[in-house]
Each structure stands twice: as C-alpha cells, then as structure tokens.
Image: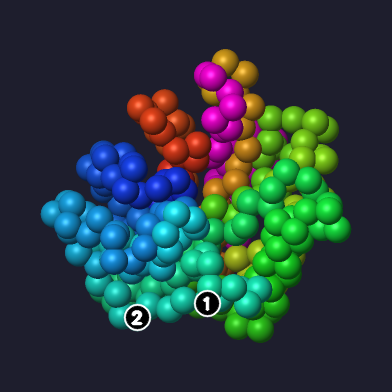
Amino acid sequence: MRLVVTSWNINSVRARIGHVLRHLDEVAPDVLCLQETKCPDDRFPLAPLRAAGYHHIAVNGQKGYHGVAVLSRLPFASTDVIGFCDRNDCRHIAVRLGYGAAAGVVIHNFYVPAGGDIPDPELNPKFAHKLAFLDEMQAWGSRTQPAANRSILVGDLNVAPYESDVWSHKALLGVVSHTPAETERLERVRRAAGFVDAVRHLRPEPERVFTWWSYRSPDFTVNDRGRRLDHVWLSADLVPALRAAEVDRAARSWERPSDHVPVTVTLQV
C-alpha cells in the first residue's frame, strides 16, 4: 500500500483554503498535516475538505494563532493531543491510522514556537518558551519512545538544524531558527525519540534544501535565502518503506502564498 503524507504550515487555513484544495487536487496525499491554522475548531472549513474526499479530520485550534490539523482520506483509529509548557496553545495533534496496511501508523503533527527575534532567553520570553518547548519534546521522546513502532513526526519545527538547511550557515548562526541552542536541542529531540530525518535520508548534506522563505524578500527566487524549518521524521522501521521526499517550491510562488511550502513523503507500507 502506498502512503503519501504532506506537512505544511499554511499560515491560516481559512485565508488559504484554495491553496489547500489545490494541493489536495495536484498531489492527492493520503494525509495532509497543517500547522498554523489560526482557526478555532468550530470554524474549521470542513465542508470543502470533505467534498474533496478528506472525510477524516482532526483539529486542535484557537482563534488567530497557532493551531494544527490532520486531514485524511484514511480513517483514524484514535486521536490525541499533548500540551507542552503548561500552555493550551494548540501546538500538537496525533492520529493513529486505522485502514489497511497503514493501520497502526501514528502521525504526530507539531508546531514548535518560532521564538521571536532575539536569541537570548533572558531578554526574549518567546525564545525562552521555544527552548523550553524543545526540552519538553526531548523529555517526551525519551519517556514515551514514540518512534518505537511505525510512527511519523511532521511539522513546522521552526529550526533549521544543519548547515545546508540555511542559505548561509555563517550569517545565520546568531539568528533565531539556526542558533546552536536550537539546532542542538532539535537533534537531541530526534535522537531521544528514535526518529530518522526522511528528507536528509534521501537528500543528504551538502545538498541545500529549503522549505521557508521570508515575506520580507520581494522575490524569493532571486537570492534563494531560505531555511528548512519543516520536517518529516520516520521511525526506523518505516525507513525501508520510504520511496520519495519532495519539497514543493512552486507553492511559494502562488498568489498570496504561505511563507512555507509543502513537504511530502511517499512510503510503501
């Protein structure tokens, strides 16, 4: 059975529902995980998504900020939400698939805090929150071992961990998303939980791979100053099933786009 999973920070699902539907039509993933939906659960645009064939939808959202969702053509056996840092800020949702050869596969969808602009936890509470969130993710991974059996972790993790994940390692070492305090923590999260980076498994360094380009750049294609903030991780037992990992750069050029683009993996389970 082929299992196609996309992760995408959509930056408002209601504002960009047309983009979501376009991706569903063009790529037809079995599962689409969205971050930064910025939508309370009772306002989530269920009707057009169900009309597109995605009848199984799990949401964890709030008004105006954050929010995650999973849209699926495959039924769920269960869903779950975990809170971090004693906040109910809608940054995680998990589903267990309940169909065919994919039955039992667990997908964790995360939206890690961005961290603000100043990479100093003493001066910037947002950065302190980000570091604390990553520390709690590591503790969760060590405690629960989520990658022990057929699991996928996706999301806007808001960290570009490797040198080839940014347009300039030297220029961005002191910039939030690529500081050692963040990159080292994210690697500890991944190792503690037992996951393998799917994109880097198929596209190892030093190949540059970006999934985000700032809105501040009038034309992101001119200097290509991107970062790889969006990730798909696989449990070791799913790595042999990995067939492809694609970054849809073209979506960054759509009208009124998100600053992130979809990342899609294909598995043969």
8 with respect to 119 (left or right)? left
Location of residue 112 in the rendering, given as x and y in whole percent from the top left corner: 60, 59
Type of residue at label 1?
Ile
Q: Looking at the picture, how far across and down is residue 116, in whole percent? A: 69, 48
Which residue position holds label 2?
Answer: 78
168 relative position to 212: left or right: right
Q: Is residue 34 magenta?
A: no
Which corner quadrant of the image does residue 33 belong to?
Answer: bottom left
Decide if residue 269 is in sight here.
no
Query: Which amino acid lies under the numbered mark 2 shown in the image of this protein?
Result: Ser
| Marks 1 and 2 in Cβ contact (< 8 Å) | no
- Height in image: 19 above or below 99? above
Q: Is residue 256 left or right of residue 28?
A: right
Residue 44: percent from left, percent from top: 29, 59
| Crowd rating for badge 2 (residues with CA inside 10 Å; few <14, some 14–19, many 20+) | few
What are the residue bounds of the magenta stretch?
196-219
Magenta segment main secondary structure = loop
Residue visible at 53% across and 73% down in the picture: 88
